[in-house]
Image (cartoon, rainbow, N blue to C red):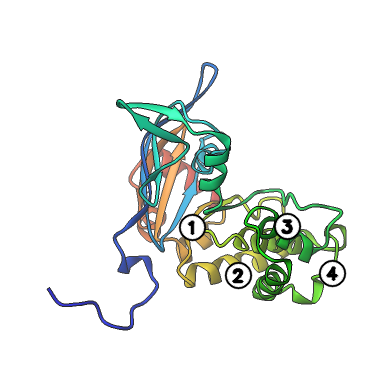
């Protein structure tokens, strides 16, 4: 076997390592069966896009990956580590709060709403977790935060408070804040859905740059153009199940399932 060339592209097509592996995932809220046996893998460096109607389970799936929701059955692995549980005698036992927090440090999440601290500046929002969770020296965290704010185009507004920023700018601060923890996986839960249309492009540009850098991403979105341009896989969910999955260009141009066809006809 020949060795890999010295220079390789960051595209997910170049790696086969599954960073995320989901097996038989179920989630109940009382009698409501929200996730009904989800199987999914996301390779390292891949952008996996999830689409589907409201209530299909997309956001719940992300929240399960990040352990904001407990699972009812199945397993989730991130970097080959069982998420949220330990297995003993073929039974799952939920991890304690400290261990769950440790695992969550490796996963960044960006929500529909920005969830910034209103009484802190953009810079203070970004340095909060590295200083208080990772124990980074404040001067180091500040230097890194300024670099991240520059990366998302907001270095000149480092001292602005959230109320002084547009929705798109707040969302870019939220992305910088998630990146400050140096995650190996980024989850985006409809990051542009709360934005005015003219502000969506700036946020998508930041996400596209992240994808180009090789960041592994799972993105719930209604931005079909983003899915087509940036996604490595596109998964259509409905009713808590995966209806169809494949290359975004193929799924969008030639969907195979009637439910996928009906959904895309309404959003394209």
Numbered tag placed on residue 128 in the rendering: 3
Tag 3's secondary structure?
helix
Dot 4, how many residues are within 10 Å of its Cα: few (below 14), some (14-19), or many (20+)? some
Q: Is residue 193 visible?
A: yes
Image coords of residue 99 (percent x, y)? 52, 41
CA gap, disc 2 and disc 4: 23 Å
In this rendering, which labeled residue sits more in front, label 2 or label 3?
Answer: 3
Q: Residues within 10 Å of mark 2 (few under 14, many from 20)?
A: few
For residue 143, above or below residue 93: below
Give the CA distance from mark 2 to mark 3: 25 Å
The one nearer the camera, 127 or 250, is: 127
Q: Position of residue 164 (x, y in %)?
A: 87, 62
Which sits earlier in the primary sequence, circle 1 or circle 4? Answer: 4
Residue 200 seen in the current view: no
- Relative to the observer, which residue lies in front, 243 or 80? 80
For residue 143, the mark is: none
Between disc 1 and disc 3, the foreground one is 3
Residue position for label 2: 205
Badge 2 vs badge 3, beta-carbon distance below 8 Å: no
Helix, strand or loop at label 1? It is strand
Q: From the viewer's side, name the closer residue of 28 and 118.
A: 118
Q: Secondary structure at mark 4?
A: loop
Q: Position of residue 125 (x, y in %)?
A: 75, 59
Which badge, 3 or 4, is on the more N-terminal residue? 3
Q: Are marks 3 and 4 in contact (CB under 8 Å)?
A: no
Lateral position of residue 114 relative to residue 237, left or right: right
Q: How far across and down, in percent of the image, does residue 57 sit?
A: 51, 35
Callout 3 crowding tier (Cα within 10 Å): few <14, some 14–19, many ≥20: many
Decide: few, some or many residues near mark 1? Use Cα within 10 Å; few <14, some 14-19, many ≥20: many
Q: Residue at x 71, y 51 (%)?
A: 194
The residue wearing badge 4 is 159
């Amino acid at each position: 076997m020949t060795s890999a060339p010295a220079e390789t592209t960051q595209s997910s097509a170049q790696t086969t390592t599954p960073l995320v592996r989901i097996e038989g995932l179920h989630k109940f809220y009382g009698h409501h069966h929200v996730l009904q046996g989800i199987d999914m893998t996301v390779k390292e460096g891949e952008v996996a896009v999830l689409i589907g109607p409201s209530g299909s389970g997309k956001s719940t799936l992300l929240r399960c990956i990040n352990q904001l929701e407990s699972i009812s059955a199945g397993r989730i692995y991130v970097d080959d580590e069982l998420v949220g549980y330990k297995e003993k005698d073929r039974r799952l036992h939920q991890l304690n709060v400290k261990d769950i927090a440790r695992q969550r440090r490796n996963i960044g999440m960006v929500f529909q709403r920005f969830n910034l601290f209103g009484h802190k500046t953009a810079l203070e929002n970004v340095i909060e977790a590295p200083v208080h969770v990772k124990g980074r020296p404040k001067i180091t965290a500040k230097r890194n935060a300024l670099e991240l704010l520059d990366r998302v185009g907001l270095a000149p507004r480092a001292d602005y408070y959230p109320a002084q920023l547009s929705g798109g700018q707040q969302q870019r601060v939220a992305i910088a804040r998630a990146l400050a923890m140096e995650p190996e996986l980024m989850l985006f839960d409809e990051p542009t859905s709360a934005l005015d249309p003219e502000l969506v492009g700036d946020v998508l540009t930041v996400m596209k740059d992240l994808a180009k850098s090789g960041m592994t991403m799972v993105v719930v979105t209604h931005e079909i153009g983003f899915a087509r341009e940036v996604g490595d896989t596109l998964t259509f969910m409905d009713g808590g199940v995966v209806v169809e999955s494949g290359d975004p260009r193929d799924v969008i141009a030639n969907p195979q399932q009637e439910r996928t066809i009906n959904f895309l006809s309404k959003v394209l």
